[in-house]
Image: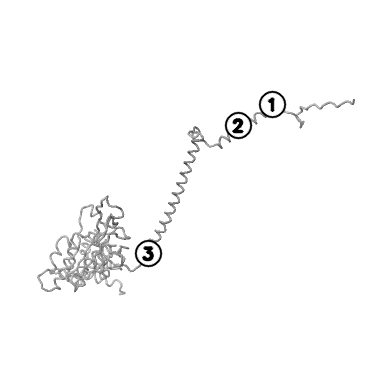
Amino acid sequence: MADQPPAEQPSNQPGSSKATADPSDPQPSTSSTGKEAASEDVKMDAEPELDPEILKASPEEIMTRTRLLENEIKIMRSENLTLSHEATMMLDKIKDNTDKIKNNKQLPFLVANVVEILDIDPDVHESEEGAQVDLDSVRKGKCAVIKTSTRQTIFLPLIGLVDADKLKPGDLIGVNKDSYLVLDTLPAEYDSRVKAMEVDERPTETYTDIGGLDKQIEELVEAVVLPMQQADKFKTLGIKPPKGVLMYGPPGTGKTLLARACAAQTKACYMKLAGPSLVQMFIGDGAKLVRDAFELAKEKAPAIIFIDELDAIGTKRFDSEKSGDREVQRTMLELLNQLDGFGSDDRIKVIAATNRIDILDPALLRSGRLDRKIEFPLPTEDARARIIEIHSRKMNV
């Protein structure tokens, strides 16, 4: 027999590619143990934590609970579908109501005045069935009584698009000509002649344009300008400024010019009323002009009302059978009420001018109305020299 070659012995050299691992080497067992631990951690992280009650429950109990949850889900889906359908219907109703409001708010409106705001709190018996109850009779809230421009008095159980808390008696409103529902509030109505009395362009005169009236300027500033510019100081000191000033003197002594200069120095609204324009032919028309003038001044307060030629309406009262004289007296009475009535406003200052203080009614001159009286005498020689100097400033001499 041929000699067989000896079996190759495994080489333990480190360079040999066929070297076998030593069983005593701990590295393979350590790596395999780490992989198994990591895989176990991943499995534990992936598994959700179950409720202890579920873990303790039997399979039959779990199935019963699952069926209950499925039924609840079906009910919630049905409710969700119902609510979405109701929401769609509500959106359609809102769209229809919006279109109706646009149609109703189309101009022109019927002009009306609020007469009274009433509270409705009806006594409804609980025994009445819903179908037999009148909605208008059980409506709680506020209702209104209005009077239209056609002299119709209307009761509105449902006011309309304007909140009832924003309405008060006397307000001017626009209503639907068919349903009389209140659609909008309108600005206060003033006589066009009163609006024309407001001076839009502020006077440009200054105190330096007035000569020989230094004392009168000082008194007018103390009575009118300072109380309007420094009202807080007057309140702190407890000083009540005069409500009005009466300037009297011969014609051409600078009464109107000083009033214009006073209005230019303040940022107040300036209104000029002429006494003869307050004498009207129709009964109550002159008093309405005075009332509207003061209402407009209250809206634009602080304001200065200058009444020129006060003697046209402020003469002493006397017994007369002529209706014209009585109308003038009614106008003066309205002026007295506005100067010192319940609705007087301290932010409104009245400056009146007259040439005849001797014929004015004593009620106008008493304290609380035209408190400060300022006399405008004829200019002295020094005053006339100052006047000539003022008028010749722009002359090339």
Residue 350 appears in the rendering: yes
* Up/down of 230 relative to 16, above or below: below
Q: CA distance from mark 2 to mark 1?
A: 21 Å
Instruction: Specify whether 16 is left or right of 252.
Output: right
Q: Amino acid at mark 1?
A: Asp
Query: Which comes before the other along the chain, label 1 or label 3?
Result: 1
Q: At 34% across and 68% down in the image, what residue appears?
A: 107
Badge 3: how crowded within 10 Å, few (<14), some, or many (20+)? few
Q: Residue pushed farthest right?
A: 1
Q: Position of residue 26 (x, y in %)?
A: 67, 27
Q: What mark, if any, has residue 102 been given in the picture?
A: 3
Q: Which mark is residue 233?
A: none
| Residue name at image x 59 percent, y 33 percent | 40
**Residue located beneath label 1 in the image:** 25
Three-letter residue code for mark 3: Lys
Which mark is on residue 37? 2
Return the x and y of residue 65 as percentages of the image width and height. 48, 38
Task: Give the distance between the C-alpha atoms of the residues marked 1 and 3, in whole angstroms.
Answer: 93 Å
Image location of residue 266, percent across then percent down: 28, 62
